[in-house]
Image: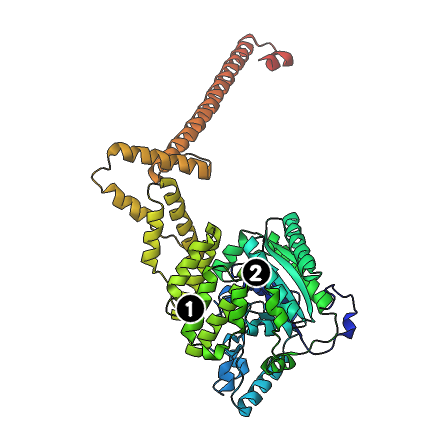
Amino acid sequence: MDSLHFSEQDSADAQSKPHIIAFAGAKSAVGKTSVVANVAAAMALRGKRVCVLDVDTGLSNINTLLGLRPAHRLEQVLSGEKTIAEVLLKTGEDVGVVSAASLMGGIPVSAAQMTKLSEALTELEAQFDYFLIDTAATHTETVLRFIELAQSTFLVVSGDPAALTDAFALLKALNARQYSGSLRVVVNQAVDYPAATDTYRRFAAVAEKCLKLKVEYGGFVIRDENLPKAVALQMSVVDLAANSPASRCLFALADNIIKHIGSETAGNGLLDYWQALLTPAPFKHTVADIADSEPTAAVNSWLAADKTELSVSELSRRLLSAMKHQLLDQPELERFTGEFVEAYCEQFGRFPNTFKQLFYRWLETENYAEPRLVELLTTLEALHAMRYQRPMFSLEENAARLVAQLQGQQGSHRELVEQLCTAYRQAFHEEVFDAEQVLLERMQADDFTEQRFEALLQKLRDGFQARFKRPYQSRHELALASVVEALNVMGVDQQNLQDEITMLMHGFQLLGSRREKLLTVLNALQNSGLPLPASAVRDN
């Protein structure tokens, strides 16, 4: 296996062919598809042309996470029903998505179909710089082929011991196939950076001890409450909350891909990659591979038997017997189970009839924590909406469920109603209810008393005072206050006028008094015949 270190070559050396990057997760629920979707969105936001090829035959929920509704698939291009442009979907961040899960391991039955596929892939290849391959969380031959033919692979793990065990089994299978690409480990759902590095070190130590292989660190994604919110809203978390802890980790991972993988030598291109997939691979399982699993003598003799002489029922009986006696290790058994289910689906075109019971059994044995179950439920609801073009539950059913959950919680119930009213107001720019009409109707109730009316009236007055910084007054009260104010002004004017009249009367009296004195002096002078001094006249 080649060195897994990031190279530091100049980006000018990169050729025109796009890079093929596989994302693998040996166990479901490690968040592989979420990492693929968000890394693609982050790279697109960095200005890169990115396309995701969905080859996950499991839930195949990359479209659900990105809020897409695929109507066509890649196999319809082979039949000539659709063009690659009609199959290609794009997100708001301009990330391309192509659903190709149904072509996993399938080879076109005619040269004409192969020609159509080549033309479609060539057209698709010219539109993007990076193709991210979202593989299934199994160890099947087809999945291993998708990984080993990619130039670069990111193995997504978590701190869950079972997830690390499955990831080690996948790494072991790739090592046995002499995988020549660069492989890096991404720790998802980490509590923090120290926890992520601790998970990586434990995994790398086991790989070095058991496989003599040094596994490089690719990055980590921290656990973030915005991730389930983004899943519920069917959008990338880097678009929902670009500055959230998880988004910063995803942008860092995207930047590393662009800086290092994007600067490596030219990619092998999508067409060459897919043509290699369609080329039958040589059988690589040897006796050494079988011995490496250390089966017991009974299993060795069974494996050495001529399987062509045994019926499927006999093989199944012997396999169950070996499983019950713990003669197979867990990674090998899980690899076989994945291959068996895939072969069944390819043969009959559907999952086994017992899948529903197995699904319930899986939920019970995994002992999932509440956040995982919520995420699974959200995914199932999104799948239902995508399949039937309507929500799983009606508005009435959702309302009834909310009311039932809030039974006896008056405060939470009120808060929910307020949130709904706020959302309605923001959406339609009007109130949900006519407050005046509601109040008038409430006043008509038999239990609405005069005392309650007075109390309500006082609250309204207090609210008016708080809003307009003055006491409330009706139009009649305002008119009366205006009249009183006018009368007060008239009273003041009347008093001022009265004071002026009083002063004038006093002046008249003084003037009359002086006139009388002057007349008296003049009469006296006339009677005496004496001249009157000028000063005497002035004094009077």
- Disc nearer the start of the sequence (1/2): 2
View extreme (top): residue: 528
The answer to whether residue 473 is seen in the rendering is no
| Residue located beneath label 1 in the image | 317
Q: Is residue 279 above or below residue 241?
A: below
Residue 1, image x, y percentages: 71, 68
Left or right: 360, with 448 as reference point: right
Q: Secondary structure at mark 1?
A: helix
Checking the image for residue 166, the label placed there is: 2
The quadrant in which residue 380 appears is bottom left
Residue 412, image x, y percentages: 39, 43
The quadrant in which residue 146 appears is bottom right
Checking the image for residue 220, the label placed there is: none
> Which three-letter amino acid code belongs to the residue tagged 2?
Asp
Q: Is residue 199 above or below residue 526?
A: below
Which quadrant is the C terminus positioned in? top right
> Which three-letter amino acid code belongs to the residue tagged 1?
Arg
Q: Are marks 1 and 2 in contact (CB under 8 Å)?
A: no
